[in-house]
Amino acid sequence: MNKRQFLGSAALLSAAAAPAFGSQHARKSACAASPVMLTISGAIRRHNRGALDPAFDPLLAKHQVKFSEAYGVDLALIAGMPAVTINPTTEYDSRQHSLSGPLLTGVLEHVGAPAAGSTQIVMHAVDGYAVATTLDKVRAYRFIVATHMDGKPLPLGGVGPLWATYDADHIPELSNKPLKDRFELSPWGLYHIQVAEG
Ligand SMILES: Nc1nc2c(c(=O)[nH]1)N[C@H]1C(S)=C(S)[C@@H](COP(=O)(O)O)O[C@H]1N2
Ligand SMILES: [Mo]
């Protein structure tokens, strides 16, 4: 499936959802219109949803996430951001793959995250894996939020739908290390990011 179809299906979904949810949510026009792929909470200036609801946010609750408001980044937003392609050797098969998706810094800017390099970034994956880093590192490694591998959308149940990753082959402090030690900061199945002032 190519990028255009990925975006196309998101547009279709929002069109289908519009009659059912349009009037009800008319006041909160910023509310996500297609499936939310990534929730960002903490020290951000933009929000499109309210507090974590333990009844209907069970995975977030299970992973001890807490927020009174957050931004749900939907499929259309992610698919519409300029995609960057990297070709890292992945740990799983020791081969190079093309991975593409928006820069994580772009996604963070969209939700109004602080610009200070010391800003703390915690990324949570669907399997409970969580990793903490800083905006400095996100910039230095040129993290992308990969949506596609070798041109195909990343599946939920596999390493997707979102995989925060970087081109370790071209990051000296990582390319020095054995392959199995390069991707600690690279959560597959990324679904939540907590931002905190550094
Ligand atoms: N979602 C998720 N991402 C993950 C991990 C994980 O357990 N779950 N492990 C991390 C670590 S420590 C490494 S070295 C690589 C490979 O770990 P894995 O084989 O558990 O995926 O992925 C990183 N990303
Ligand atoms: Mo690891």
Image: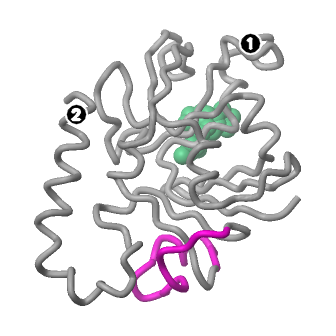
Q: Residue at x 74, y 35 (%)?
A: 139
In the figure, 135 relative to 148: above or below? Answer: below
Q: Which residue is mark 2?
A: 4
The residue mark sitting in front, 2 or 1, is: 2
Magenta highlight on residue 143: no
Query: In the rendered view, how is the structure colored?
Result: one colour
Q: Determine which of the numbered discs, if any, sits on residue 186 in the image.
A: none
Q: Quadrant of residue 128?
A: bottom right
| Mark found first going from the N terminus, 2 or 1 | 2
Asked if 51 appears above or below 111 in the picture, the reply is: below
Amino acid at dot 2: Arg
- The residue segment tinted magenta is 45-66
The amino acid type, in three-letter code, at marker 1 is Ser
* Rendering coords of residue 88 (x, y %): 56, 15
Pick the quarter of the image with the C terminus.
bottom right
**Secondary structure of residue under mark 1:** helix
| Apparent side of residue 34 relative to residue 17 in the rendered image (left or right) | right
Toward the viewer: 23 or 12?
23
The dot on residue 175 is 1
The residue that appears at 37% across and 40% down in the rendered structure is 158
